[in-house]
Amino acid sequence: MTTPPDHSHADDSMIEAAVDDLGQRAGASLRRPAPEDGAAHVMKTGAKIRRRRTTGAAVGVGLLAIGTFVLVKRSDGSETRTVTSVPPPVTEPAASSSPTPSTAASTTTVGVTRLDARLDQWALDYTGGTAGPATGAPVRIGISGVGDVSAMQATATYLNTELGGIGGRPVELVNCDSTFTDAAVACASRFADDPTISLVISGVVDAAFVTTLGTSKPRFGGGASGDEGTVSYDLGGTQAAYLAMAKLVRQNVPIDGRPVVLYPYPNRDALAPLLDGYGLVQVGDQVDANGFVDALNAQNAADAGAVLLVGRPSHCDTLRDAVAQLGTDPIVITAACPHGVEGWYYVGASYNPDEPSYETGAATGVAVLKQYGNNRDPGDSLYDVANLMTAAKIINSVGGPDAATVEVLNQALVDFTGPAMLTGEQDCSLIANADPARHTFPLSCQKTMSVLQFRDGKYVELQPIDITTP
């Protein structure tokens, strides 16, 4: 799935106001009610709630799901290296153009704003790091197509300042573009040929990046998995979100001729085998609410049974207004909206924006972005924090950077069962043993996907969805 990254910037004043509102509205209780059954609950209450659907109050933070369609800041700074802070990620020019986390309901930390000893200890236990600053030669990690480079940069600064980097050495990010074919080939070739690159974390990349990188470096994150000659260990992200979205549709929308709308970025080829029997209709990203309604009418899809939304914050607003115009009751399942809309379902990575959990690492991730990311709103960026923290965990677990050969890291990823930060238990055997000629994209190591519903002005946590079975 190739999607141009979003280089736009949200209105900072609106985000800050929303964050203030979240802090005021967050309850003092640290106890949650027992999760409801998300799959069965959709049909039982969905229609009633959707009939009274209105715009939910902005809560300032978005549900983490995929770090793919969010704000991206790219930098082309020099390769200066420090110990207590990390320079902007080295951007390669394109050739052309311990407590452990759990997904179960758990103690939450309401109104997280700064790191404290408890959150730092969670991070040390999770990564296997050593308290204090990192020193020595850097551990270089290639990144391409990730959702939010600046969020990953903030995480690297935190690792280097407080957690001893990776194996006591500072983390250095090497970022290059892989949006289009020529750039993707050049980027992957640099990573493949650079012996100082330990592993690669990818997001949305051109297919040429995947095939060019091959198995030269261990890779996890988004992008294609299991393609011939390649392996990417998806520990929770785009592919897991597709699996969860499709399962919600199959369980709760009958095959009765009503289409399923993909808006604007869901990969039709990825979802088609998961939604066999449903008519799939795609609406592009360059439309307003009126244009969305017109697009559905033109495709005889105004009576859609469901809308799957993977996009930017502006797309969330467009869909909200378009559904109000249509006056129909489609189930809306989204993986990337920064605010709640009454009745909508949010699939994600065990991150309730109202109550970030301590045990899953969400509270630590929120605090990292607040303290080292210029007090930024977490939103989908929390997934990028989790990916880099997990990279540190994997490398530390094999004995540090000196022991982290390609073969050793690949085996460590195959054997990794989690819990992973935010995304819980993992099983990468499906990916590791996939037959490239027969596998069905998407594939994910993640075993369950959390589901929230925005109801009566707040997020309600439902029973996680098992995404290991159809």
Image (tube, helix red, strand yellow):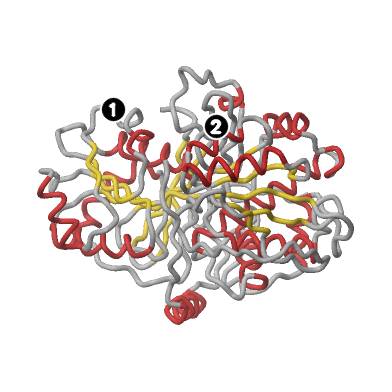
Q: Earlier in the sequence, mark 2 or mark 1?
A: 2
Mark 1 lies on a secondary structure that is loop
x and y percent of residue 96 in the render? 52, 49
Residue furthest to the right:
136
Q: Is residue 223 visible?
A: yes
Label 1 belongs to which residue?
276
Could you tell whether 244 is left or right of 120 in the image? Answer: left
The residue lying at 51 percent from left, 53 percent from top is 67
Viewer-side label of 2, 1: 2
- Residue kind at label 1, given as amino acid type: Asp
- Residue kind at label 2, given as amino acid type: Thr
x and y percent of residue 216 in the render? 68, 32
Contact check, label 2 and label 1, Cβ < 8 Å: no
Could you tell whether 146 is left or right of 2 in the image? Answer: right
The residue lying at 58 percent from left, 60 percent from top is 149
Residue sitting nearer the eye, 106 or 145: 145
